[in-house]
Image (cartoon, helix red, strand yellow):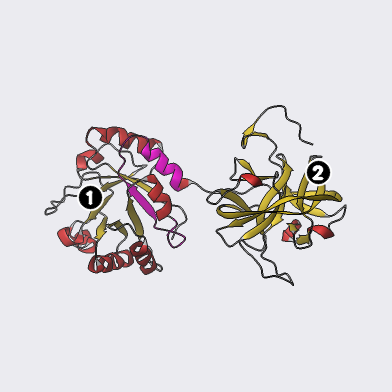
Amino acid sequence: MSDTKQCWIDVRGAGELKAALCQEAIHHGLDAIVADDPADLAGLPPTVTRVLMPPVGELDGEFGAADLVVVDPAVHGEPATLAGKFPGHRFGAFVEVTDPDSLAAACDSVRRDPCTVLSFRDPTNIPLEIVLAAAADAHGLIVNTVACVEDATVNLSVLEHGPGGVLLAPAAPGEAGRLKEAVGRRSPGLELVELTVTGISHVGTGERACVDTCTYLGKDEGILVGSRSKGMVLCVSETHPLPYMPTRPFRVNAGAIMSYTLADHEHTRYLSELRAGATVLAVGADGRTRTVTVGRVKIETRPLLSIDAVAESGEPVNVIVQDDWHVRILGPGGAVLNSTALKPGDRILGHLPRRERHVGYPIDELCHEQ
């Protein structure tokens, strides 16, 4: 299945809002507009797929400008049969899942039909999981009906990849744009730079934070941590074996509590501000990123180690971490480096956000951090 998810809106029953909703969908580049009257599809540009979902009754072949006709097989007949009856038109199926029989029909449709639009009666993702599993080797488009934008983001993560698209009936203008933003949200890569270690020093004791995420982190993956907002170091996850304790692949022993980290691409947070349910940006040694959910932050008093480094641009970078051998930092090529074994001249990976911060937001103003 494609990683690019489609956004559809349903204007059936939208009344006097139909025209405004259609214009908003076109403006935001939504993929399809669904109507039950061919007249509502007339005049829509070819940049949007015009989908007709005809009402109950015998089909008369008057589909207007529809690019796709989505039918209820129990009422109108199977899409393959209709394609033969009305040549030149594409057909898909609509299946409402309410019981085991309709679930089986949905599984059959996603394996057979070029497009299946689904609706699930009960507030559980289990039937959707079953349908997606049934479609694992199929190539048809699956579009699931959602009640709100928030449901769309949940749907698209079911079985990790979700359906191929979501269909929303907007209650008001503005929702189509929010749907497009939510569905199209991706985590772009970050530019990582090589930093040269200039000094290591023991700085007494203080509170450090372990960030426990709700996600398995990779062996070359961690979070960016820095004492200053304009320079951060990539601290690796505890995915690498230790002789005296099991690995904790969900954890990053991140650093002193006042340290900055990236909550997402735009916003920083202090480690002390992170809470269960917050987000943090997981970063790989190649710069790939993903937003992960924080499950817990463990703050404990430990000996601390200060690591100073400098970028080729001359930007100074500092990170204060727990003073222990098992706290690790990533180097070029994903090399895993024990922090207590670092020495001047060693190369480590970092990121230079370049802009100052105010309550976590990037801002252009005079600010000295030292």
Quadrant in the rendering for residue 134? bottom left
- Which range is magenta? 157-183
Residue type at the position of mark 2: Glu
Q: Secondary structure at mark 1?
A: loop
Provide the residue designation for mark 2. Answer: 312
Quadrant housing the N terminus: bottom left
Viewer-nearest residue: 340 or 167: 340
x%, y% of residue 154?
42, 53
Circle 1 Cα neighbour tier, 10 Å, few/some/many (<14 / 14–19 / ≥20)? many
Provide the residue designation for mark 1. Answer: 53
Q: Specify whether 243 is left or right of 148.
A: right
Residue drawn at point x = 70 percent, y = 37 percent: 354
Is residue 99 located in the magenta-colored stretch of the structure? no
x%, y% of residue 318?
78, 45
In three-dimensional space, the C-alpha distance between marks 1 and 2, rounded to whole angstroms, equals 60 Å
N-terminal label among 1 and 2: 1
x%, y% of residue 312?
81, 43
